[in-house]
Structures are given as C-alpha cells and as structure tokens.
Image: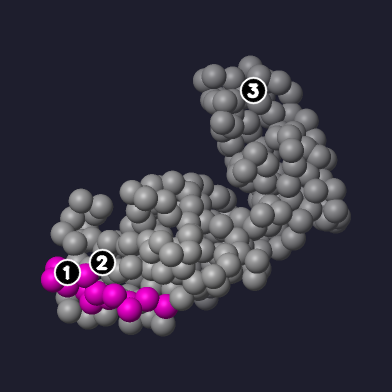
Amino acid sequence: MNPIIFRQGVCDPHIHVFQDDDGSAYLIVGECRLPAPCNCYFIARLNDDMVSLAEPLRPIEYRGNPCPEDKPSIHKYGGRYYLTHSSFYAISDSVYGPYHYVGNTGCNIDHGSFFTYHNQTYFASGGMDNPNRYLRASYLAPCHYRAGGGIVIDQKIMEYGCGQYDAAWDKIKAEWYFSASRECKKELADRSFAVELKKGENLSFPNIANVEKNTKIQFCGSAQMPGKASVIEIRENDAEGEILGICEIGYAGPETKTGIYECNLSAQGRERR
C-alpha cells in the first residue's frame, strides 16, 4: 500500500474520489501550501479496495489559472473531464490532465462537487452565509452544459430549492426537471436551454405547491415538424397516473422559435389553443 504523505508546510488538505465510466477510481488531493501563493493538485488511481493506491500520487498540470484553490473535485460529462474548485473549472480529455482553465460559474465559492441523479446533473456546495464562519449552509442546484463544454449553474432554482416547485412562480423552466427518461437538455442558438422530448418520454416535477384542478397551465415550445402537432400529457404523480390535461403543441418555426400553448388542468379531456 502506498501511503499519502504531506510535506511540512501543507495545511488543510482536501481529498476527493472520482470513479470513471470503466469503474476505475482515482484519488484527487488538493493541498493548501504555506506560505502562499499557490495550491497544488495530485492524482492517483486507487486499487479495487478503494482504499490503497495503485500508483504513486502525481501532480496534475493545470493551465490558464495561476493559482487554483485548495478544494478540487473531478467529474465527467460528454467524454470530458472537469476539474472544479470552488466556482472555477478546467477541462481535459484525460483524467490525468493537463487541465485547461475555462472560467467561473459565478456560483457559490465554497467547497463543491457535481453528481448526476435521475438524468439531472447537480452542483452541491457549502456556503458561509451564517454569522459564524464555521456554521455553513448547504446548497444544491441543477447545472447545464453548453455545446462547447461550458458549465451554467442555475442559481435561481438554487434559491427556490431543488425537487420542489410552486405554481405561483413566474415560470418553471423545463430544464429544472427533477427526473427524466433520459438527459434531454440542449442549448439553443440564443444560449438559453430547453428540453427535447421524443414520443413516450417524460419529465417529472414533483411537489408543486398551489396547483388545483380546473386551472390553466401554459407551455412554451414547438413541435419538431411542420403540420404535425406534438401532444403533451400532464399526469398526476407519475407517468402512469391520472391524466390532468392534454395540450397540443404546434410547429412554431425554426429551432429557436417557440409558441405559447395552454390547457386546463382537469381530467375532462383535451383543450387546444
């Protein structure tokens, strides 16, 4: 077993474990050097016992940001490896790097990491928003990926809270879904995000407050083909639940254009606009 030994002058080390698609697991270590000015990251593959090192720790080459912070984590999306620290992130084609700095999500600057659940990717972090710096809050927000690999963290839903919704909000964005048949988010030409569903696929938005039957629900969207409407069924509880409404979505033009359609939330049949 290869032990981890920190040299003199290192304080507050941070450790993260990442498991790749093929089952290989890696230990990522971030160290806060004393004195400043910079922190360093190290990586090593773990043995199958997930405790011992299969190889010595090696430095991670980090390009573009001269002084990364001391709380790294790695996750994978779209075949790329993301090395994140606080609200900053860098991207590589290899888990070992080199990682190229991309930017700052502008989200919480405390310790954070990413995970995927029910085909939605989340950013989880702490937050020092209490009077005492040692008492930290916890935050969770869905994040979306641009076509070029950039990360967008939806801070508005972070304020609302994940997995719960309110019909009194101005809007509930489709990409805020709690679960989906598959990951179906896409970036549009105007750099906003939308979801693309195929026949038989579904999204789930549980725990919606202030919803009553015989009220209206509006959808902003477009069918994929001219002359052929798409049909959205609104069901209670799950995909097999009682139908509360059916809305036909017409073709509204090119990909970035959408129309507004509405139906009554009731089990009385189909409404069309």
Where residue 270 sits, quadrant-wise, is bottom left
- Residue name at image x 67 percent, y 46 percent: 82
Q: Which residue is mark 2?
A: 246
- Foreground: disc 3 or disc 2: 2
Q: CA distance from mark 3 to mark 1?
A: 61 Å
Q: Position of residue 97 (x, y in %)?
A: 77, 37
Residue 162 appears in the rendering: no
Left or right: where does residue 144 sit relative to residue 102? left
Location of residue 156 with respect to 20 vertically, above or below: below
- Secondary structure under badge 3? loop
Side of 77 relative to 214 (left or right): right
Quarter of the image where one finds residue 23: top right
The answer to whether 109 appears left or right of 248 in the picture is: right
Residue, far left: 268
Q: Position of residue 25 (x, y in %)?
A: 59, 28
Question: What residue occupies the far front of the structure in this picture?
Answer: 227
Q: CA distance from mark 1 to mark 2?
A: 7 Å
Which residue is located at x 85 percent, y 53 percent?
A: 64
**Residue topped by disc 1:** 269
Secondary structure found at label 1: loop
123 w.r.t. 54: above or below: below
Residue 235 in percent (x, y) is at 23, 61
Q: Which residues are magenta?
A: 260-273
Q: CA distance from mark 3 to mark 2?
A: 55 Å
**SS state under label 2:** strand
Q: Are marks 1 and 2 in contact (CB under 8 Å)?
A: yes
The kind of residue tagged 1 is Gly
Q: In this rendering, does residue 178 appear at all?
A: yes
Q: Please identify the residue farthest to the top as the structure is shown.
A: 1
Question: Which residue does the numbered mark 3 point to in the structure image?
Answer: 53
Q: Report the front residue among 106 and 265.
A: 265
